[in-house]
Image (cartoon, helix red, strand yellow):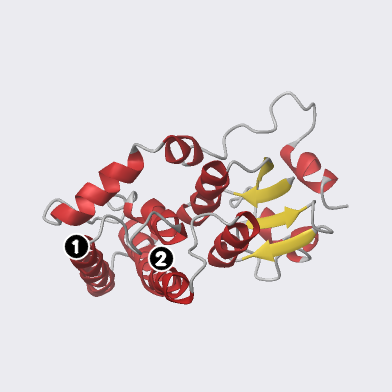
Amino acid sequence: MIELFTAATPNGHKVTIALEEMGLEYTTHRIDLGAKQQKEDWYLKLNPNGRIPTIVDRDCEDFVVFESGAILVYLAEKTGQFMPQDTKGRSLVMQWLMFQMGGVGPMQGQANVFHRYAPEKIPYAIERYQKECTRLYEVLNERLADNEYLAGDYSIADIATWPWVSGHKWSGLSIEDLPHLTRWFEQIAKREAVIVGKDIPDEMEAGTGKSKVEVIRDFVI
């Protein structure tokens, strides 16, 4: 059993999509980011960075994994799915996973901040991060011109990247002029595991008779 602590963000959706794709048994517990549950002492014992997502593998001596990319690699290696076994194939997946972790995610995250959340609109910052996101999308588009998926076959690199691209409109971005990225995005959006995974977490604690905080702490204390 995998215990997942998460919230409805692109990084959180990476893991729920992966868990659905891999057919693993898991329980999902919402972390209320607005209430800063991710900064509470009990959670920091699991994830010292105070971010989501985090998993606890109850079938492996309660092994804890944080950082979404690391979680995807762990789950892929645990199940033998969505990660090639040969050195070159594995490296290719890792390269595109790192492209998302080091590029698409951080840059689009900053685009979100300055486009949506900053108390003061700073045109320079908005333009800077939106332009860099567009450049990264163009890299993806070029890659997908000759490849169905980022690393050849469908992999954790696609699982990591899709939730961020799915939020392009929220970031003030467009993929209309990127036909290969659009084809890839729409193709993955039709996968059953993606349809389910992108809508988690929902009201997962309903019917427990406990608050969300109490339910989450039941699995930690």
Q: Residue furthest right?
A: 221
Tell me residue 17's x, y (percent): 50, 46
Name the residue that disc number 2 marks. Answer: 105
Q: Position of residue 113 (x, y in %)?
A: 39, 63
Q: Amino acid at mark 2?
A: Gly
Mark 2 residue element: helix
Q: Nearer the viewer, residue 141 or 51?
A: 141
Across the whole image, how many numbered discs are drawn on residues? 2
- Determine the residue positioned at 33% across, 49% down: 166
Q: Secondary structure at mark 1?
A: loop
Dot 2: few (<14), some (14–19), or many (≥20) neighbours within 10 Å?
Answer: many
Q: Which mark is residue 119?
A: none
Residue sitting at x 65%, y 33%: 204
Q: Nearer the viewer, mark 1 or mark 2?
A: 1
Q: Amino acid at mark 1?
A: Asp
Q: Residue furthest left?
A: 177
Please report the residue visible at 39 percent of the width from the left and 57 percent of the height from the top: 158
Q: Is residue 185 above or below residue 201?
A: below
Percent from the top left, x then y, of residue 122?
A: 27, 70
Q: Which residue is mark 1?
A: 146
Q: Classify the position of the N terminus by image quarter.
A: top right
